[in-house]
Image (cartoon, rainbow, N blue to C red):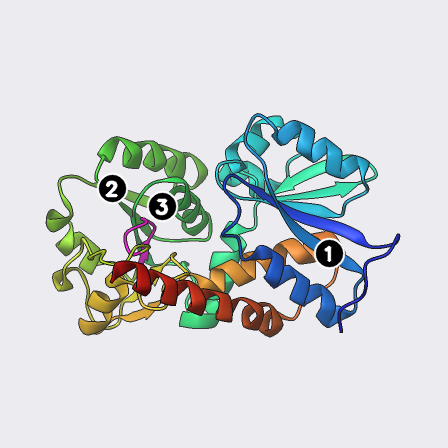
Amino acid sequence: MPIAPDSQTRLFAVFGHPVSHSLSPAMHQAAFEALGLNAVYLAFDVDEASLPAALAGLQALGAGGVNLTIPLKRRAFEILPRLDLSARLLGAVNTVAFGPDGMTGYNTDGIGFLRDLQATADMTPDGRHVCIVGCGGAGRAISLTCATQGAATVTLANRTPDRSRLIAAEVRQQAPAVQVEVLAGAPAAWSGAIRAADLVVHCTPVGLHAGDESVLSAAAFRPGQVVYDLIYTVPVTPVMQVARAAGARVCNGLGMLVQQGAASFAIWTHQEPDIARMRAAIEPLIHRCCLEKRDDAR
């Protein structure tokens, strides 16, 4: 049952710009209520220039913690005086905890991905050939996570190979034993290399909008392969459709969203949240989002 806010209510939040689309308030509020915690989770639109003052304001208010989303993760990494190993590894912060000694930055994206990969596909990166499609911030985080978790080979595919090469250099520095490959050319030329991978992680925004088509053909996929699309607002993305038709096992990023949120929750409260309740709280919101996208496309 919800607890009416009072003078003892603990504040938690998510900062982003924009932030109106965030599912975090519904997800975390459900977790608080499941445990009977007197806490509230709110969303605030905060830009990069305002981030230091906004963080200081929450700390002054005695807040318990805050999540950070685009475009604040890198900026927080640059300004926070104390960083957990997870944030130092990924070079970004998505979770800030407030304590007696000040603020500490964490990154739960990697552990969220790993936990959901295990839960959904019964797989870990250890000893696997992993292919990352899309080398933006998310692709970088997944590449470094898989490499430091024992992947045998990491293949990087991006329309602009310069970005792939930068990540490849980071992977080699963090995990020298990992074999790193950078694919050149257009997506049509990647099929053979992607097909060779055990795990393909799609990290581009293709599929977010109605009418998007997969840039990868069925030739890029095969039976026995796992294809993980980080997009969570579309149950079956175009990439997942093509991969599934080719016999691959597929999953989207909803489980990762929940798992990274659960990891943040545990950092703040030192309690494990009800994962099922968190997921159930946001599934209707995602369904509504999908219906709105279909209406907009008509």
Whole-angstrom CA distance, mark 2 to mark 1, is 40 Å
Disc 1: CA contacts within 10 A as few (<14), some (14-19) or many (>=20):
many
- The amino acid type found where label 2 is placed reads Asn
Sooner in the amino-acid sequence: mark 2 or mark 1: 1
- The amino acid type found where label 3 is placed reads Val
At 46% across and 53% down in the image, what residue appears? Answer: 149
Q: In which quarter of the image is residue 294?
A: bottom left
Q: Is residue 201 magenta?
A: yes
Give, as a single range, the part of the protein colored magenta. 200-207
Which residue is tagged 3?
178
| Residue 295 coordinates in the image, percent (x, y) | 32, 64
Sooner in the amino-acid sequence: mark 1 or mark 3: 1
Q: Which mark is residue 158?
A: 2
Q: Nearer the viewer, mark 3 or mark 2?
A: 2
In the structure shown, which secondary structural element does the residue marked by tag 3 occupy? loop
At 56% across and 36% down in the image, what residue appears? Answer: 88
Q: Residue 40 carries which label?
A: 1
Picture layout, residue 82 above or below residue 245: above
Q: Is residue 17 left or right of residue 232?
A: right
